[in-house]
Image: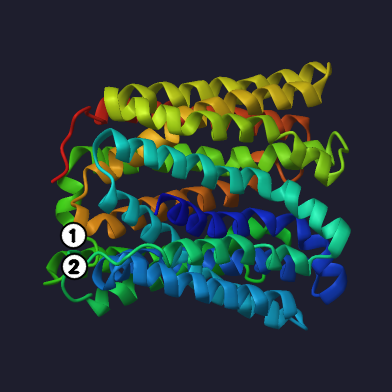
Amino acid sequence: MLAAAVLASFVSFLDGSITNIALPSIGRDLGGGVVTQEWVVDGYLLTLSAFILLSGAVSDRFGRLKVLRIALVAFAATSVLCALAPTAGVLVAARLLQGVAGALLVPGSLGLIIAVFSGPAQARAIGSWTGWTSVSSLFGPVVGGLLVDALGWRSVFVIGLLPAAAAMVLLGRVRDDPQQEATGRIDLPSAALAAAGLGLLTVGLIEVGGASHAVLPIGAAIALIAAGLVVLAGFVLQDSRARHPLVPQRLFAERNFSAGNLATLFVYGALGLASLVPALYLQQVLRLPATAAALVSLPSTILMILLSSRFGALSGRLGPRRFMTAGPLVCAVGALLWLLTGLGTAPVVLVAAGTVVVGLGLAMTVAPLTSAVLGAVPEAESGIGSAVNNAVARVAGLVTTACSGLILGGAVAQGGFERAAVVVAVLLVIGGAVSFAGIRDGAARA
């Protein structure tokens, strides 16, 4: 079951990271310029963000295993459609559909882990889930580069069929839990407002981040962001009055749930920049090839594989607070190491060293954070609890990515890279401080 849950999430995270390296090849083959390339990535992020809250409620309502199986089949089908897309328009449409399937995968897989495991075993299982799904995000560009060079960009979408098929085989060996209780009807007005609000906010952030090649004027993009925030406020009002709320407000009365999501906002906001800017700096300033730049992240990947489950297990025994406090601070030290590249001596080595330290901090942070947030959620609502946390993480990453042009000063250069490193470090320090002040060890699930 754990392997199936990991593979189901692995599919979604891999697709989010592996596609970037194929964008130049897609542009040369299908045309459409930078706008098409952006929307191949952003179309997936748009529907993923818009439907992730609804997907958590659907998973809790109709059964996690059933929803996971449907999502895997849908993801495989849309992957084939992406690989066969004859035009840029068809590819973007397929990516929009793929994002809906991806939204169903992560909350359902985490909810399944929460429902099946408990205590230290749950923390260790979440650590394993964190380590291997992080591998997909970090290792994806390397695999993507090799596939594009050897087989072409269409192979990037085909490769995801392998873990999807493996997950389906494993899920076929897991029996549905007849004791999982339905959580009531899904409030459709709340669901519509959540999807519309997150969708408008995502499009606005994408367009603001698009800068010179955005489809919409900057004023229209800002208006979309404002409209998204207004609609989300309407969602909160509607959901608070609903008989069967999409996101039960009582979840936020749990200290670890509220503090954990606030820490997620700062930590994943920092990671949005930390995963983007070094790769750009290595390629555009230090002139490394794409595959070589991606290989710089390999030591961090290895650390995540080796240590995530260990820190998850330690968190289960000792409590998450110390790890959620120390982990972001270690990450911040790694980001500050990037400032030394301005000295002009072995900058590639310094970027790699900083990335290793960031990887160590991530291994300390992510599994305990996930355990703290979901450990405060009733088992029957683990799907929506996971969806809320994932929505916070996605939006945080979108916000900082959208602000990357402003932080970098419009171009990737040494000064912009150093400013980004400072912003990353500051956000991580705030995330650690929030965890120290807000998280409590030993908080029981409601």
**Given the image, on which type of amino acid does mark 1 rest?**
Pro
- Colour scheme employed for the rendering of this structure: rainbow
Query: The N terminus lies in which quarter of the figure?
Result: bottom left
- Rendered image: mark on residue 118: none
How many other residues sit within 10 Å of disc 2, few (<14), some (14-19) or many (≥20)? many
434 displayed left or right of 283: left
Q: Quadrant of residue 425?
A: top right
Q: Is residue 19 visible?
A: yes
Q: Which structural element holds mark 1?
A: loop
Q: Nearer the viewer, residue 389 or 3?
A: 3
Spot occupied by residue 225 in the image (x, y as percentages of width and height):
46, 63
The span from disc 1 to disc 2 (Cα, nearest Å) is 5 Å
Q: Is residue 80 left or right of residue 432?
A: right
Q: Which residue does the numbered mark 2 point to in the structure image? A: 245
Q: Is residue 231 visible?
A: no
Please tell me which residue is depicted at 53% across the width and 47% down the height of the picture: 133
Residue at image coords 69%, 35%: 297
Tag 1 near tag 2, CB within 8 Å: yes
Q: Nearer the viewer, residue 271 or 313?
A: 313
Indicate whether 269 appears above or below 152. above
Which percent across, then down, holds residue 179?
Answer: 17, 64
Side of 275 where 34 appears, left or right: right
Image coords of residue 428 (percent x, y): 47, 30
- Mark 2 belongs to which amino acid? Pro
- What residue did someone put label 1 on? 248
